[in-house]
């Protein structure tokens, strides 16, 4: 999941929308992509989740390269990345209310993404995000959202790079904090200058900025040279409120 740079459109990679024949390959790639990661930051999924998506809850896009593989083989080659688009949201999901849309009408979710570790660093995660946004638009959705753990800095930085902004901090999977990010399908958030910066790992400070009516579409490396793993989030006035 560490795909920040580039477009992902490498000559040997193609992007295809998968059918239910690819469930086993997606599940195996998912297990491989989350191996060794903190489960509090990246939720391990079961096979039945992917089955439910392809049975009507949404769609899964795959990044495929030529070649055969017993574990992750799909029609056309070997699966090296996938991205879930949820078009039917779970009962009780209140993302639309939290975003300020008044409900979930016209709202789809950019859900889990997995990339083979050997293909990280080529922008596949961002490429998979872009294609799911476009697909949501093809289906008539006007807004998309995603969630990312504060500590999963790669995930939310990639989403910001594709025009998302943090609009809330929510609890998911029991009591795990997640940033809620949103963007209109028709255009990325184009932020003005940051009014304030908060350390990304200090969710109370992030909540305070959000409570002041700001949104967070910007990031930067934290100034402390001894802490390269730290990042700051930049908060701006919401686009509709900006002069």
Image (cartoon, helix red, strand yellow):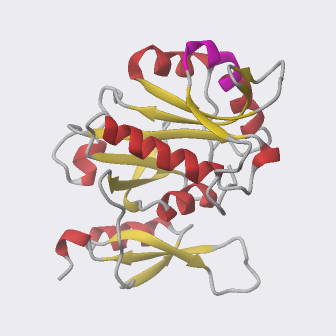
Return the residue nearer the eye: 126 or 226: 126
Return the residue nearer the eye: 10 or 225: 10
- The reply, left or right, for residue 173 in relation to residue 152 is left
Whether residue 106 is situated above or below residue 89 in the rendered picture: below
Whether residue 12 is situated above or below residue 200 in the rendered picture: above
Location of residue 76 in the rendering, given as x and y in whole percent from the top left corner: 70, 24
Location of residue 73 in the rendering, given as x and y in whole percent from the top left corner: 75, 21
Location of residue 236 in the rendering, given as x and y in whole percent from the top left corner: 34, 77
Residue at the image position 19 percent from the left and 69 percent from the top = 240
Residue at the image position 48 percent from the left and 77 percent from the top = 198
- The reply, left or right, for residue 206 in relation to residue 7 is left
Count of numbered circles in the view? 0
- The reply, left or right, for residue 90 in relation to residue 114 is left
Residue at the image position 66 percent from the left and 25 percent from the top = 26
Whether residue 71 is situated above or below residue 142 in the rendered picture: above
Whether residue 120 is situated above or below residue 196 in the rendered picture: above
Residue range highlighted in magenta: 19-26
Please identify the residue farthest to the front as the structure is shown.
11
- As for residue 200 lying within the magenta part, the answer is no
Residue at the image position 34 percent from the left and 27 percent from the top = 88
Provide the major secondary structure of the magenta segment: helix
Location of residue 91 in the rendering, given as x and y in whole percent from the top left corner: 31, 26
- As for residue 21 lying within the magenta part, the answer is yes
The C terminus lies in quadrant: bottom left
């Amino acid at each position: 999941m560490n795909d920040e740079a580039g477009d992902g459109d490498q000559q040997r990679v193609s992007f295809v929308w998968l059918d239910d024949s690819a469930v086993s390959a997606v599940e195996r790639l998912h297990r491989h992509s989350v191996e060794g990661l903190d489960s509090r930051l990246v939720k391990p999924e079961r096979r039945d989740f992917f089955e439910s998506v392809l049975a009507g809850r949404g769609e899964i896009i795959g990044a495929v390269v030529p070649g055969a593989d017993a574990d992750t083989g799909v029609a056309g080659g070997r699966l090296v990345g996938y991205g879930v688009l949820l078009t039917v949201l779970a009962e009780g999901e209140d993302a639309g209310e939290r975003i300020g849309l008044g409900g979930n009408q016209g709202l789809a979710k950019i859900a889990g993404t997995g990339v083979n570790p050997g293909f990280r660093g080529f922008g596949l995660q961002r490429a998979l995000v872009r294609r799911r946004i476009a697909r949501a638009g093809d289906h008539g959705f006007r807004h998309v959202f995603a969630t990312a753990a504060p500590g999963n800095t790669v995930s939310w930085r990639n989403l910001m790079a594709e025009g998302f902004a943090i609009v809330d901090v929510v609890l998911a999977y029991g009591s795990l904090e997640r940033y809620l990010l949103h963007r209109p399908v028709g255009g990325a958030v184009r932020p003005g200058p940051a009014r304030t910066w908060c350390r990304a790992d200090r969710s109370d400070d992030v909540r305070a900025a959000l409570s002041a009516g700001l949104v967070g579409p910007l990031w930067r490396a934290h100034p402390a040279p001894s802490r390269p793993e730290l990042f700051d989030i930049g908060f701006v006035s919401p686009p509709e409120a900006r002069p």
